[in-house]
């Protein structure tokens, strides 16, 4: 899956608490700290990989707000409350870009209460449970 985001677009998705560094290019992939290269986004969620941050070539790093690190040249850091949640927001945005509106479906394994009100153009994934009196608006995607 290909994507390209400017640092500004990603900042608007994540709303980091603090930003250090500078990167003028676009972010076009997500990679591990060790596997990142220019144009990559990477993040630190597990302290086990703390030592990998200093060597990472990622152009954009999502780091915990209290992590002490200064960016390399041509690298920007978003300090976030929770880097995993920040990454999830970005991934969610990527998913909505690549979801074709003509593919809205309700998976046969979904359990939907008869009183639920489901608008058109809704996608409900595998094993999703929709409870009593729930209202789901148009163009909604719900995954397990």
Image: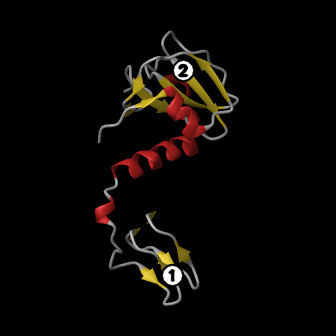
Kindly identify which residue carries mark 2: 76
Reading the image, the residue beneath label 1 is 117
The kind of secondary structure element at disc 1 is strand
Residue toward you, 12 or 14: 12
Q: Residues within 10 Å of mark 1 (few under 14, many from 20)?
A: some
Q: Residue at x 43, y 64 (%)?
A: 139
Q: Secondary structure at mark 2?
A: strand
Q: Nearer the viewer, residue 105 or 70?
A: 105
- How many numbered marks does the figure carry? 2
Indicate whether 13 appears above or below 92: above
Question: In the image, is residue 64 above or below residue 127?
Answer: above
Front-most of 32 and 135? 135
For label 2, the crowd category at 10 Å Cα-Cα, with few meaning under 14, some 14 to 19 and many 20 or more, is: many
Q: Nearer the viewer, mark 1 or mark 2?
A: 1
Where residue 119 appears, x then y in whole percent?
45, 75
| 110 with respect to 48 (left or right) | left
Kindly identify the residue that appears in the image at 33 percent across and 71 percent down. Answer: 105
Any part of residue 143 in sight: no
Residue 133 at x, y = what percent?
Answer: 58, 84
* Mark toward the start of the polypeptide (1 vs 2): 2
Q: Quadrant of residue 80?
A: top right
């Amino acid at each position: 899956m290909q994507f390209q985001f400017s640092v500004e677009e990603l900042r608007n998705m994540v709303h980091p608490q603090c930003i250090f560094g500078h990167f003028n290019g676009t972010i076009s992939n997500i990679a591990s700290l060790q596997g990142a290269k220019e144009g990559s986004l990477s993040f630190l969620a597990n302290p086990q990989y703390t030592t990998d941050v200093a060597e990472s070539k990622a152009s954009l790093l999502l780091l915990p707000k209290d992590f002490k690190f200064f960016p390399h040249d041509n690298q920007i850091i978003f300090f976030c409350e929770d880097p995993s949640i920040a990454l999830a927001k970005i991934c969610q945005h990527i998913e909505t870009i690549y979801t074709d509106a003509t593919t809205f479906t309700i998976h046969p394994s979904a359990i939907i209460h008869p009183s639920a009100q489901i608008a058109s153009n809704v996608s409900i994934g595998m094993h999703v449970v929709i409870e009593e009196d729930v209202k789901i608006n148009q163009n909604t995607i719900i995954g397990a």
